[in-house]
Image (cartoon, helix red, strand yellow):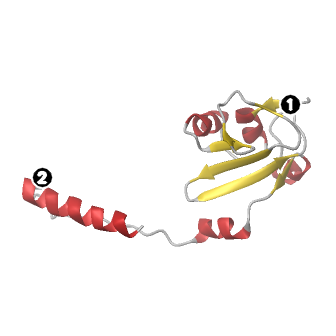
Amino acid sequence: MENARIDKYLWCIRAFKTRSEATDACKGNKVSVNGNVVKPAKELRAGDLIRVRKGAVEFSWRVLGFPKSRVGASLVPDYAQDLTPPEEREKLHAPVESFFVTRERGSGRPTKKERRIIDALWDSFDAED
């Protein structure tokens, strides 16, 4: 095989659990090849640089070859060179900051005034990013 669709290739090298996840990532503009955002049917060639955004982490691979089907994890380096910097991989293990607004059980929906206070609080957290 001399080339392959980007969605199938990402599934074959285990970047995604399913091919439909890879397709959705392409449709969601989370996959780029050589700096250009691509659609799922984009044909890859050897030497292409792939970048995939999964959450806060951006993974990078260089295409070395094309497997006929999904390969085992130990065989992935034969088909894709992992160029992901260590700083990006560390983001996977970073603590997840979460913020929950809790209301007492039975207190009902927030009033308009309470909703405005909650929205202002969320906006203050977004402004810090």
Q: Residues within 10 Å of mark 1 (few under 14, many from 20)?
A: some
- Residue 3, labelled with which disc? 1
Distance, label 2 to label 1, CA atoms, is 55 Å
Q: Is residue 124 left or right of residue 28?
A: left
* Point 87% across, 44% down: residue: 47
Vertical placement of 42 versus 59: above or below?
above
> Residue 75: percent from the left, percent from the top?
88, 49
Q: Which quarter of the image is occupied by the N terminus? A: top right
User: Which residue is label 2 attached to?
Assistant: 109
Residue found at the very far front of the displayed protein: 35
Kindly identify the amino acid type of the residue bearing the numbered disc 2.
Answer: Arg
* Point 66% across, 31% down: residue: 40
Q: Which quarter of the image is occupied by the C terminus? A: bottom left
Q: Nearer the viewer, residue 64 or 109?
A: 64
Disc 2 is placed on an element classified as loop
Judged by depth in the image, the label closer to the viewer, 2 or 1, is 1
Mark yes or no: residue 32 visible: yes
Q: Quadrant of residue 117?
A: bottom left
**Sooner in the amino-acid sequence: mark 2 or mark 1:** 1
- Residue 36, labelled with which disc? none
> Residue 29: percent from the left, percent from the top?
58, 40
Vertical placement of 64 versus 7: above or below?
below
